[in-house]
Image: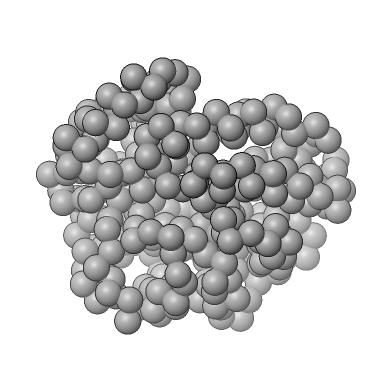
């Protein structure tokens, strides 16, 4: 059976931006609902490297989570203020990555999430070859440094960020070519990328088999999994709508056996309710739904 976590960012950004759910309430409620862990959105008001600058503060945060009976399944690093594609000097991005990498080490977090930061419209001002070189070169360095500290790097592709075509995702991952780097496969993003071709510049690139075919093509390159449904729409015309299980059209009985063919460096499945307007209210329902999937597919068949 898989260990189940959920992304804490669902309760701090978007609809919750002006009224975030406090960290203590999040972790105690998740424990009551039967979660094994929480995936940390590393930005205020939840624990983050800037608000917890000392090792003593970080040790206290780590100890409190253990006291509640949860573990961290990963870190979504706050890199969105940085420049990755639209600069030839990645030093600020790398410095911010290092800050979050040290935070992972201090909290005992095994995986660090990245994305390409800039939207797909960036290709109107930066040619794709230059953009790709900047992403690959920077992530190669970040991946090496993370490997030295025992943390893996996982790339969450999605319609809202550059390089959102199936061939981009596969090609960049292969070009980085490190066992410490892989793809974070979010099921709703996979559907919007591979079936809908949402926000893809130029000619859209979709796959006849949709998200399942993308998972098949990425087999062996996936190192982190986010599970949530998709209704085939975008949130605010930017990123995939993270519809609660049962409110969308995804066939998890087809997707999960394929995703089980990847050798992950951990045992987590993570729910992602990002930008869902009543994420806190539907968390219990989401946990019940993923528990049913876990009972069917969590043993790896």
In front: 32, or 124?
32
Image-based side of 223 in relation to 286, left or right: right
The percent coordinates of residue 71 (x first, y second) are: 28, 44
Res 59 visible:
yes
What residue sits 43% from the left and 60% below the top? 265
Determine the residue located farthest toward the front in the rendered image: 148
The percent coordinates of residue 30 (x first, y second) are: 20, 43
What residue sits 39% from the left and 22% below the top? 55
Name which quarter of the figure residue 260 lies in. Answer: bottom left
In front: 108, or 167?
108
What residue sits 80% from the left and 32% below the top? 89
In the rendered view, would you say 88 is above or below 269?
above
Q: Quadrant of the N terminus?
A: bottom left
Determine the residue located farthest toward the left in the rendered image: 32
| Number of numbered discs on residues | 0
The percent coordinates of residue 37 (x first, y second) are: 27, 47
The percent coordinates of residue 218 (x first, y second) are: 58, 71
Q: What colour scheme was applied to this rendering of the protein?
A: one colour
Image-based side of 120 in relation to 286, left or right: right
What residue sits 73% from the left and 61% below the top? 175
In front: 32, or 284?
32
Name which quarter of the figure residue 62 lies in. Answer: top left
In the rendered view, would you say 136 is above or below 8?
below
Res 210 visible:
no
Name which quarter of the figure residue 11 lies in. Answer: top left
In the rendered view, would you say 255 is above or below 266?
below
In front: 185, or 175?
175
Q: Quadrant of the C terminus?
A: bottom left
């Amino acid at each position: 059976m898989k260990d189940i976590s959920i992304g804490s960012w669902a309760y701090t950004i978007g609809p919750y931006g002006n009224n975030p759910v406090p960290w203590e309430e999040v972790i105690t409620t998740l424990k009551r609902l039967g979660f094994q862990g929480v995936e940390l959105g590393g930005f205020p008001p939840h624990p983050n490297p800037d608000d917890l600058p000392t090792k003593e503060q970080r040790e206290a945060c780590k100890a409190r989570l253990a006291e509640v009976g949860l573990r961290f399944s990963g870190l979504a690093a706050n890199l969105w203020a940085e420049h990755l594609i639209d600069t030839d000097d990645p030093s600020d991005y790398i410095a911010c990555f290092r800050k979050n990498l040290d935070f992972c080490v201090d909290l005992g977090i095994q995986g660090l999430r990245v994305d390409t930061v800039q939207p797909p419209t960036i290709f109107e001002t930066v040619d794709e070859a230059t953009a790709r070189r900047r992403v690959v070169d920077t992530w190669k360095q970040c991946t090496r440094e993370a490997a030295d500290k025992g943390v893996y790097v996982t790339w969450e592709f999605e319609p809202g960020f550059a390089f959102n075509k199936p061939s981009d995702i596969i090609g960049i991952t292969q070009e980085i070519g490190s066992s410490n780097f892989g793809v974070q496969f979010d099921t709703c993003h996979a559907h919007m990328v591979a079936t809908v071709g949402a926000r893809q510049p130029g000619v859209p690139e979709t796959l006849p088999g949709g998200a399942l075919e993308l998972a098949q093509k990425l087999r062996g390159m996936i190192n982190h999994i986010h599970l949530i449904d998709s209704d085939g729409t975008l949130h605010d015309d930017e990123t995939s709508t993270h519809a609660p299980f049962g409110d969308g059209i995804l066939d998890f009985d087809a997707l999960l056996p394929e995703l089980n063919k990847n050798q992950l460096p951990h045992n987590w499945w993570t729910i992602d309710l990002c930008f869902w307007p009543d994420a806190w209210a539907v968390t219990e329902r989401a946990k019940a739904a993923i528990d049913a999937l876990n009972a069917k597919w969590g043993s790896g068949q």
